[in-house]
Structure formats: C-alpha cells, structure tokens
Amino acid sequence: MHKGISRLIALLAITTAVVGCSTNPVTGKSQLNLISPAQEVAIGEKQYGPSKQSQGGEYQVDPGLSRYVDSVGQKLAKLSDRPDLPYEFVVLNNDVPNAWALPGGKIAFNRGLLVHLEDEAQLAAVLGHEIVHAAASHSAQQMSQQQLLGIGTTLAAAATRQSQYGGLIQQGLGLGSAAFQARYGRGQELEADAYGMEYMVAAGYDPQGAVELQQTFVKLSKGRQSNFLQNLFASHPPSQERVDANRKRAATMPKGKRNKAAFERAMGQLRKDAPAYELHQKAIAAANKKQFDQSLKLTEQAIRKQPKEAMFWDTKGKLLQHQKQNRDALKAFSRSIDINPNYFSPYLGRGLVYKALNQHDKSKLDFETSVAMLPTQLGTFHLGEYEVQAGNKRKAYAYYQSAARGGGKLGQLAQKRMQQLNPQPQQQRQYR
C-alpha cells in the first residue's frame, strides 16, 4: 500500500476515534460525525434559501399544495427519532422528479416528483425517507468525511453559470444547482427506506406505498428520462434490491390508509396545469436547439393555459431579450416579478434589459436583488462593473472574484478585471 494512503487511513482512524464518534439517533450505531446538532441546524438554515432558489424557487400557483405536503411531513416528523428538529417541507417549482433534505430538517419536494405519485401513502414514503436522511445525520456524515479528506463542503455555489443559449437558466436545463446533493451510500439509502417505512406506518399509512415508490423509480431509471433524472439517481440510486427489501418489510407490517381522495384534491390544480408545464418543457428544449421562434410560440401557449405561472413569463422575457426585443422583454420580466417577487431569475433578466436600455440605477438595483437571493456569475460580474464605475474598487474586486469562480469565458474576463484593479495584498487576502 502507498505510504501516503497508509498515513491518510491512519489519520482518519485516529481523528474518528478522538473527535468524530457519535451515536446515530435513528439506528443507535456509532458513526463518524464532526458536525454538532446545532451546527446541522445552522447549516440547513443558511443553505435553505439559496438551495431553493437554485432549484426553481417555491411553487406558487397553488400555495395550498405546499401546505398539504408540509402537513403530511410534519405528521411524520413528530414520530421521527429527532422530533425536535425545525422541520420544513416545501414544494419547488421544478420539473425534475426529485426530493432532497438539508442537514437540520429542511426538506424540499419537486413539483415534478409529485405528478408521479398516486396517493398520500406514496407521498408519505418519500417524506419519511427524507426525514430519516435528516434525523440520521446522513448529510452531516457525508460532510464530515469530506472535511477529513480535505475536500471541503461547498453547499451553495457562489456563482452559478448561465445556460448555453439565450440566457435560459431553467431547471434541469442549464440551471446551476446550489443545493447540497449528498451522494448517499447503499447502506444509508436502505436505512432511510427501512426507518422511513416505520415512520409512515406509525402515522397510519400503508407501507405498500414505499414498495410502489421504489418500483416507480426503477421504472423511470430504465426509461428515456434517465438523463433528466440524473440528480435523483445520483443522490438516491434506485435498485431492484430496494424494491425487494421494501416488499419483504411491508409484508411484516400492518396495512394502513392510502388517502387517495385527499391527495388528488390537493393535486387538482397541478394536474389541471400539466399540459401547460409540458408545453414549457418543450419550449426549453426548443431553445436549447436554437429554435427560438418555436420556443417563444410554445411559451406563449403555456402562458395562455396558465397565466399565473411566473416561470413562463420569465422564460418569455429571456427569449425576447435574446431576440433584442428589450421593451417587450422588460414587460415579461416585470410580469413574472409581479406574480412571484421572491425568485432571483426575472430580476437578473430585467437587470440585463435595463442595462441595455441605459437605465443603470434600475439595472443595478435588480442585480442586487437577484444576487441577494442567489449569487450568480452574471449578476456578480455586472455588479462588479457598476462598482468600478462608482470608484468602489474593493467591492468590485469581491464581485469579480465571485464571478471568476464560475469559470468559462465570463470567469476569465472577471479574472482579467481583478488584475486590472490590482488591489493591495491586504485587500486580496480579505476576499479570498
């Protein structure tokens, strides 16, 4: 064995024995965890906002759906092995079938996963699984291992990149992910399945929902959507082994409620709007093929079907901006913001349009609003430009440094700007 590897293994063993041992509150087993419960909560709180922003923002068309999902999640959380965590459950405006949990109990459920479920028992199976990831500190364990290996833990990217065409940064198609996507191991996934089923049965749900859920994931993994679902499969790898394990476990558990009628009532608006979201997905696909006229046509069809979806107006603004129709783009971005003022993307787009129209005060304000929600490469770069014009070299340097982390041509340009500013060594150290 290589001497360096031997020393690393020895160091890991010593460090684990001295400072990293704790008892898993779910399984009762000893585990490596360098992050305290209070730190878990703090990390989750800090990363929750940027993680939601980077994944499409909160689903706003029917707020009742998020309240429904949260009510089911809270019911399960109270029965978990860590009921004292500040659990939150939110539906994200994202087409990709996925769900994730941050340390400390912040849990997100994509709109795109809900449409694949059939009843409340299947919903409870997903939520129970994610609750276990939080309660068993699975994410914290992943982060602890990274710290020991010197990898570091970048939970939220400081600068997400723009997509290839027309500034379109919609979910799954060029949108940088700032969410912490833990790569759970086989053992952690089986733990989350097993204890999640216990939580759902304790709440009165039929454990067969967990069997059906894994069957759905295995089916999706074999279909044409595999690239579309890469984040789900990377963080929650499906397998027939998990289906079989859930089926065997369910056979020993009591039957329970499915609550299909309640689930379908809560899903009513989302089911009704399915054709609009399908049109929007086709619009994004067309844009990424440089078929911009077709993309705009499909986006406008989606808007006619559901004019209250801010994401559709945001996409329309980006397409019009790409076609240099700045006045119309401005109206589309503003409409998106009127509908949902709590999402970074239309502010970023409108900031670019205002800059093109030489309305610089409004442009800078929109960039600042956008970056406060999610620091993007494009937003931080343009704020750097504005700070240079204002004579604020230190602030400009910090913005350029953030933009440089995004790489690519814009990152190279940001590095060039930093060299031109030539800050004093003390200033350089401050922004590292």
Image: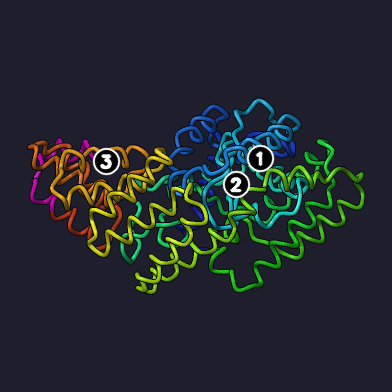
What are the residue bounds of the magenta stretch?
417-432
Give the residue pinned by disc 3: 366
How busy is the neighbourhood of tag 1: few (under 14 within 10 Å), some, or many (20 plus)?
many
Residue bearing mark 1: 69
* Relative height, residue 93 to residue 215 (above, below): above
Q: Which residue is mark 2?
A: 109
| Magenta highlight on residue 8 | no
User: 410 left or right of 117?
Assistant: left
**What amino acid is found at the position of numbered circle 3 in the picture?**
Asp
Is 419 left, or right, of 31 in this rendering? left
Asked whether disc 1 touches disc 2, contact meaning CB atoms under 8 Å apart, the reply is yes
Q: Residue at x 82, y 61 (%)?
A: 244
Residue 305: % across, % down: 52, 56
Viewer-nearest residue: 201 or 181:
201
**Residue placed at 37% from the left, 57% from the top?**
316
Q: Secondary structure at mark 1?
A: helix
Magenta stretch: includes residue 420: yes
